Amino acid sequence: MEMILERIVIRNFMSHKRTEINFNMGVTAFIGPNGAGKSSILDAIYYALYGKSARETIPNLIKKGKRYCQVELTFRCGGKRYHVIRSHSLLGSKTTANLFEILENGKRKLIAREPTTVTKEIESIIGLNHKVFLQVIYVRQGELERIILEPRAKRKEFMSKILGIEDLQKAYENMRDIINDFERELERIKGEIKQKEERKEELKKVKKELKNVEKRRQTLLEELSKIKTSLTEVKTQLANLEKQKIRFEHFKAKLEKCESDLTALENKLDTLRKELVKCEDARKRMKEIEDKVKLHDKLAEAASKYYERDAVKSELLDLENDYKRYTLLKDTLAQLEKYYNEYQTVEENIEKIEHTLESYAEYYHELQNLEKEKNTIRRELNEYLREVNAFKKLLEEKLKVEIKHDEMGRLIGDTKARIEEIIDGKKREINNLREDLSSHIAVIDDRKKKIEELKKVRVKCPLCGQLLTESHRIKVIRDLMEEVREHKLEKMKIESLIQKLEKDLEYYEKEKTSLTELWNSYYNEIHPKLNVIRKLREKLQDMAERYTFLQEMTKEYLRSKQMLDNLRKKRRELERYVTEYNKVCAELEALEGKHGPPDNLRLNIELKKAKLRTLEDEIAEIESNLGVHFEHGEEVRLKLNELSMFKSEYEELKSDFERLRVIEGQLQNLVEQREKLKLEIQRLRDFMKKIQYNPKEHESVREKHDKLHALVGQYEGELKSLREQAIKLKQQISNLREKLKKLEAKEKYARRLDKFIKLLERLRSLYGKDGLQKVIREKAVKSIATLTSRYLEKFGLGISNVGFDENFDIKVYSSFYSEAIPVKNLSGGEIIAIALAFRFALAKVIAGDRVEMLILDEPTTFLDETRRRDLVNIIRDVFMTVERMLPQLIIVTHNRELEEAATTVYFVNKDATGTSRVTLQEEAKI
């Protein structure tokens, strides 16, 4: 059951915005100028099947200006219908794919999703991967007859890739590296196995060393037991001595403390005796200063009256000064009030204007931003215009006409089409002239040959067969030579004309290349910029009305701002008066807060005067009693200071006098304590004599104990070291046994590895040139030759058989000749026929019955007019016969001649926006 394409829907794919195509059985041709988007349809088929592109990277498949592309393909294979959907998005560079089976009821069943899974499933269904599909089913530009005409080595290389022989050869070569790796591994293992005897000897040596360690350890254990017994006895003796020492030290410490306390008591007794003398001196001094102390006490009681009188005088003075200040401030406030009221009015007006400016400020800032945006757009617009105008100037210089921006694409396309027509015409002229040139050369060669014959022949004319006379022979030779000269002149004229036409063709080809570059630059760079320019101009136009409104609002903003500046200036002028006004108010408020209303202040002044008179009377009476007189309280304070030192001295002496009896009692107690301490000291000295503690003996026993203890530590350390050494040796023995075990395992592995290497060598020989490669090559050569001959037989060109040797050298046999015809001697039509038959046969052999379709992309590229005509005739005349073996043929071409050979024709062109348009022609009967 063959694979047949049914329908494809293309969205935003390369130059296609939305294209929908139905594929019929027979020959489907897509016809259109170069760059119209024909080959993009084949790319879409390839992308739908394999998720790849034959020409572009996947992101470049998306149509310019779009965010995603999508291709839907419906095909039939193995008696089932399938529908695949693939898409790619620029957002996150995400690719999606889904494969459905279309059931008999028309419903779809999802059988695979995700790009990789879908591709693997399709490869399984049609039996071809993407590489084989490109090389066998999809015949790209210029590759139709190349396989026949190119050197044998290139053809062999191509067929080796197709048939998988190249992969077998690579496998053959790669297996050598693999085998080498295994052989190196085997040599490495054999080197390790050689260590086996060394390991055995090492194991024997370690066991002997372990035995010596165990013997030494047992000896040490016995000696250590004896030392520990001696150490126990010494410890007991040392413990007894420690107890004696503790008791001795205890009584010694108590004795030292009692002796220390006795010394302290003696010192204390001396101190108290000195203080007792001091107290007797204090009592005598107190009697000397007692009168002055009494005067101090009486004057201290009266001092408050003097101080109060001074305070009342000060307060009265302050009240009178505040009253005068209050009167002055009231007068100043009346003068400043008019400036304060004016300031309040200005402040209210400023607040109103500031509120108004807040609304206008938004318009002002919006205008600033809008101006920045307009300048940015203008700069961007000028930059685009500069690039577009530079391209326009280049195009005008190229085409020698003045052009508008919107005419550039059309003019480039029209000019390019005209040059392509000229190129086709020049090529036709050159081909016709070359045919004429071949005719003249043939005539010249023929006439030269006849002249040589005439020079040799003496009896009969080789032209007419008549008997020759000498004069007749000379005349015929002269006529022939004249004819040769005429043909040579014609040949030279044709050669000169061909040379001129080839120069013209070279010129127009360069012009075509130049225009193609301009065309690509226009649609890839200039056309998008023109769209941007149009959008920028529209944006500027939209901004104009808003800009005018914002300008009016800004004028109001600036007028209000000027008024605000004037008011703020006036406010600054009034601020010093307001500050003075506030200062006066604050001071008046402080005075009123301090004294209350002015009437209260006057009342307080009168009250203070009355109190002052009362204090004067009381002070006069005090001075009369004491016999002193003071004008001010300061004089009283100075007198009190003078007497206060006697008062202080008296109080200190009084304290010393009061301690006299306390000291006498303390002296009596200390004497009693001293006697008790003397008795305790004697008792402690008696106890220490009874203990009989000897420090030298104690030190000797301690040294013996330390030596024994150190010896125990030394023995235990050595035992620990021996124990660790024994553990390490045992571990070493275990490791050596494990290594020996591993070496024995490696011996077995080496034997298995040697057998495996020999097996790999046998398998490698199967992949070699004389193995599977030869089998596949011979079978493929036979199948391809048989099918190619069968197809050529249908073409009816007189070619009876085509064969290939094992190096894919082509042997062509005709029904008219017994020997093989060299390919170079075949006509253009015969080469096209063989190439087409070979492609059909190759597709049949590689794809089998699952894919019976062929895609030809620009098959007429590099073909002259004669070969193009032959290709059209072959497809038109025999395809209905071949249809049983190849139901579907898809052709993409810019040549209208192939329209004659197609059962279904689609015309592909680009519109003014650069988008491909596909239209269906009514089906034609071939």
Image: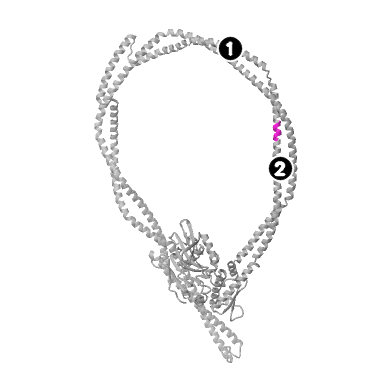
Residue at image location 74% in from the left, 37% down from the top: 216
Give whichever of discs 2 and 1 has the lower sequence position: 1
* Residue type beneath disc 1: Lys
> For the residue marked with disc 2, what is the amino acid?
Leu
Q: How many marks?
A: 2
Residue 158: give x, y in percent of width and height: 58, 68
Q: Nearer the viewer, residue 910 or 423?
A: 910
Counting from the top left corner in percent of width and height, residue 490 is at 51, 80
The location of residue 140, given as percent across then percent down, is 52, 68
Does the magenta run of residues contain 715? Answer: yes
The reply to whether callout 2 and callout 1 are in contact (CB within 8 Å) is no
Q: Quadrant of residue 520?
A: bottom left
Answer with the quarter of the image where residue 410 lies: bottom left
Q: Does the magenta segment cover residue 873?
A: no
* Residue where numbered disc 2 is placed: 729
- Say which of 468 and 41 sits in front: 41
Q: Which of the two residues, 112 or 855, is positioned nearer the viewer here?
A: 112
Which residue does the numbered mark 1 point to in the structure image?
676
Q: Is residue 415 visible?
A: yes
User: In this rendering, does residue 390 appear at all?
Assistant: no
Give the side of residue 347 with respect to residue 693, left or right: left
Label 2 packing within 10 angstroms: few (<14), some (14-19), many (20+) = many
* For residue 254, above or below residue 848: above
Mark 2 lies on a secondary structure that is: helix
Label 1 secondary element: helix
Residue 643, disc: none
Q: CA distance from mark 2 to mark 1?
A: 77 Å
Crowding at label 1, few (<14), some or many (≥20) Cα neighbours within 10 Å? few
Point out the stretch of residues depicted in magenta: 711-717
Residue 736: image x %, image y %? Answer: 71, 47
